[in-house]
Amino acid sequence: SYELTQPPSVSVSPGQTARITCSGDALPKKYAYWYQQKSGQAPVLVIYEDNKRPSGIPERFSGSRSGTMATLTISGAQVEDEADYYCYSTDSSGNRVFGGGTKLTVL
Amino acid sequence: EVQLLESGGGLVQPGGSLRLSCAASRFTFSTYGMSWVRQAPGKGLEWVSVISGSGGITYYADSVKGRFTISRDNYKNTLYLQMNSLRGEDTALYYCAKVQGNIASSNWYFDLWGRGTLVTVSS
């Protein structure tokens, strides 16, 4: 079955840039989406269609996709950005897949 | 504010059944696809099922195909998930999510999530 691979954890200091990657064989032809899930809360969409920010999401969140990899970048990460981040996409057959999640620590 | 409120979770024995509901408010429910996504305790997200705005198109993850049925009542602005032949691996927090995009295409995603309802399958 199709998999999206993310690093289990990323750690940065406040104000630094955090980059979370997501790799998958179908990504050259499929959009990537990113969700933020803070502890005990429901997921929130932070990036859609590779690089678009929903209303209300801070400008420090950005996304990109190149080849088999999508990247979520948080420029000037804040303590409140500490959360689990999941990428989401589809394979060539239309199956919906989430990455395994990346725990972002900002301290 | 757009709202999704799940209910119906609980403890059920293996092989049992449960029906989840999701009440939607403050958006035109019938014009959006809706989906269920689950999260096992301490684990990641897993897409379960999706239904079109009219209810005429449905898709399921392989892990639940033949056991779960998604449906909706556009008069009551409510989404449902009928879960039969439940297994231990179905234990999870089940989220209802509003879908953005045409589910008949490859480009659709979840733009709003409820807070979830917990399903525990155990004897």
Image (cartoon, rainbow, N blue to C red):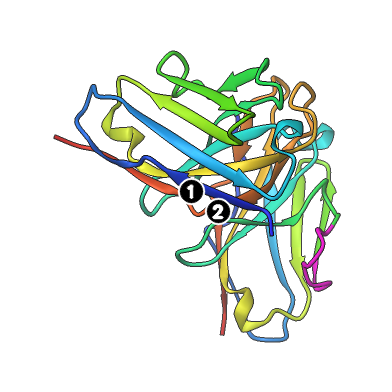
Q: Is residue A86 above or below residue B55?
A: below
Q: Given the image, what chain letter belongs to the residue carrying mark 1? A: B
| Residue B82, quarter of the rendered image | top left
The residue tagged with tag 2: helix, strand or loop? loop
Residue A19 at x, y percent in the picture:
71, 66
Q: Is residue A61 visible to us here? A: yes
Residue drawn at x 51%, y 49% is B5
User: Where the N terminus of chain B falls, by quadrant?
Assistant: bottom right
The label on residue A101 is: 2
Q: Residue reaching furthest front?
A: B75
The residue tagged with tag 1: helix, strand or loop? loop
Query: Does the CB distance between marks 1 and 2 fall below 8 Å?
Result: yes
Q: Which residue is mark 1?
A: B44
Residue A4 at x, y percent in the picture:
62, 41
Residue B118 at x, y percent in the picture:
36, 47
Residue B7 at x, y percent in the picture:
42, 44
Residue drawn at x 27%, y 33% is B88
| Residue A74, quarter of the rendered image | bottom right
| Residue A68, quarter of the rendered image | top right
Q: Is residue A1 visible to us here? A: no
The label on residue B6 is: none
Q: CA distance from mark 1 to mark 2?
A: 6 Å
Q: Given the image, what chain letter belongs to the residue carrying mark 2? A: A
Amino acid type assigned to the residue bearing label 1 in the image:
Gly
The magenta segment is: A53-61
Residue drawn at x 42%, y 35% is B20
Q: Is residue B14 above or below residue A58?
A: above
Is residue B61 part of the magenta span, yes or no? no
Closer to the camera, A51 or B78?
B78
Amino acid type assigned to the residue bearing label 2 in the image:
Gly
Q: Label the magenta part by its dominant secondary structure.
A: loop
Residue drawn at x 62%, y 19% is B58
